[in-house]
Image: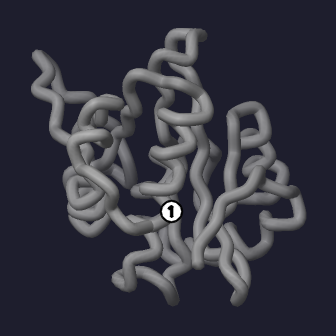
Amino acid sequence: MIRIRPYKTSDVDAILSWCQEEKAFYQWTAGILGNYPITQKEFSFVESLMPFTAFDETGIDGFFTLRNPDKSLDELRFGFIIINPHKRGKGYGKAMLRLALTFVFEIYGAKKASLGVFENNLPAYYCYKAVGFRDVVLDTTEKYCVMGEEWNCKELIMENMDLALQGDRKI
């Protein structure tokens, strides 16, 4: 059974070992944490956010951060979401996000959760959609210059009532 807890600095080696490819690294960080390959010192930036680690009886399964973009707790924004590559495609990402969303809405009392995902990261996009996030139609698309290319970022949200409408899903 997957659980989440506050991130510990001792988690860093496992988390950083999950990004062995430059493109995957930038899909995960958009370069905000630094250039590939990232150092432990650069990764320590996440400690200024609300970082969490997902784990089960076998060890660390995933990582994500939360932040409050408008300085209230009405909206919490996910960032730096990553799953151990050996556990991808097995429901760990969905389970971690469902737990995190319960935490966001029930513990923090947020009204909305949001995140951004690159259009070229379809597995992540479909994971977020499967959990209940929905696309936001914006006037302009956020773009990042990554690896000499322009990457478009999709904006997704989930409101507290969206989660309630999903009923009693098993995590």
| Most distant residue in the right direction | 10
**Who's the residue at 51% across and 89% down the image?**
86
In the picture, which quadrant includes the N terminus?
Answer: bottom right
The answer to which quarter of the image holds residue 15 is bottom right
The answer to which quarter of the image holds residue 45 is top right
Count every numbered label the image shows and give the total: 1
The amino acid beneath tag 1 is Met
Residue at the spot of label 1: 96
- x and y percent of residue 158 in the render? 30, 35
In the rendered view, tell whether residue 170 sits above or below residue 50. below
In the picture, which quadrant includes the C terminus?
Answer: bottom left
* Residue 78 seen in this snapshot: yes
**Which residue is more in the foreground, 50 or 121?**
50
Local SS, label 1: helix
**Who's the residue at 38% across and 65% down the image?**
94
**Which residue is more in the foreground, 112 or 16?**
112
**Who's the residue at 59% across and 28% down the image?**
108
**Which residue is more in the foreground, 103 or 29?**
103
In the rendered view, tell whether residue 58 sits above or below residue 15. below
